[in-house]
Amino acid sequence: MNNVCLCVGNYAKTPFYVKLSDVNLYSIEELCYYFMDKVRLIDDSIVTAELVEWIRTECGLAELADELEVYVRKRVSAAAFVTTILEKTGMYDDKTIRQIEVVLKEQSSLTMLERYKKQAEYFYRQGRFRQALVIYAELADYIPMRDTANRALMYYNVASLYALDFAYDIAADYYYEAYLLNPDRQIRLAYIIACRKSMTDYAYGGFKRENPEWAEDFARAEELCADAEQKWQSSKEKETLAQLAEYKACGDMENYYCQADSLITQLKYDYKRQTQL
């Protein structure tokens, strides 16, 4: 068997809880895997006496804890702290550990604003939209009010996350905040589309009459919405729902429940992927 390593220490009775990731870790190997898998999320806040105490009492690694305790007192960087744990545990080869160390050192030079932006972007790219929203909420406290460009970008990204979750009314509010700070046409178009999706036809008609100077953008928004509808009608997801409806209409409940269960399982997986790390 390849890639087998000998575990060290004990399996913890009480897990170590990582707040940012909302995850419980039960062994030093799980901690190492977390460092490896979530390296882009790690900063100096991981260097804590609580983690050292957990390694000592729960994992039974007193010698490693003694060394890390010194690191905590001296306030060393996350790079030195993490690589020491990785080296002592032996889960990864030296080349991999050095790569992790380089990433951590690069991140240590970032400002708090830059760090939050990178974390939010990471979650967004991973499809973990709710985690990205949490980070953006914290990011707002670090962007000066006078920095209109970054605040506009933040509002735009938050709006886009809500739009992906079909919360178009909330998305419209954030797009509007972004537009007030940066009256860019792309932002305005996104704002119009969010309004189109969240408003009744009557309210949207009034919205159009209130903004006659946006006539070209309203026309473009209609084109984009029509394109999206056409893609939906020809999508695999629409075909699946149509097949389900046909099974039910024909009384073929065995196939109906089988396909419905499969669809629900996939939806649960997608939901967990968005809400868990």
Image: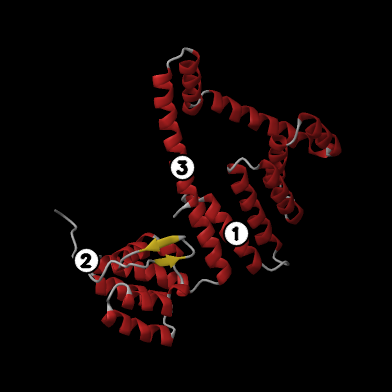
Query: Looking at numbered disc 1 in the image, what kind of residue is underneath it?
Result: Tyr
Tell which residue pokes out farthest to the front in this image. Answer: 13
Q: Which residue is mark 3?
A: 270
Query: Looking at numbered disc 3 in the image, what kind of residue is underneath it?
Result: Asp
Distance from the alpha carbon under mark 3 to that under mark 2: 32 Å
Q: Nearer the viewer, residue 208 or 267?
A: 267
Q: Is residue 90 left or right of residue 242?
A: left
* Figure quadrant of residue 99: bottom left
Q: Residue at x 76, y 53 (%)?
A: 180
Q: Nearer the viewer, residue 50 or 38?
A: 50
Q: Nearer the viewer, residue 15 or 149?
A: 15
Q: Nearer the viewer, mark 3 or mark 1?
A: 3
Q: Nearer the viewer, mark 2 or mark 1?
A: 2
- Quadrant containing the C terminus in the rendered view: bottom left
Q: Is residue 209 left or right of residue 35?
A: right
In x, y percent, where is residue 12? 32, 68
Mark carried by residue 136: 1
Mark 3 touching mark 1, by CB under 8 A?
no
Distance from the alpha carbon under mark 2 to that under mark 1: 38 Å
Distance from the alpha carbon under mark 3 to that under mark 1: 21 Å
The tag earlier along the polypeptide, 3 or 1, is 1
Crowd tier of the residue under label 3, counting other residues whose Cα lies within 10 Å: few below 14, some 14–19, many 20 or above: few
Query: Looking at numbered disc 2 in the image, what kind of residue is underneath it?
Result: Cys
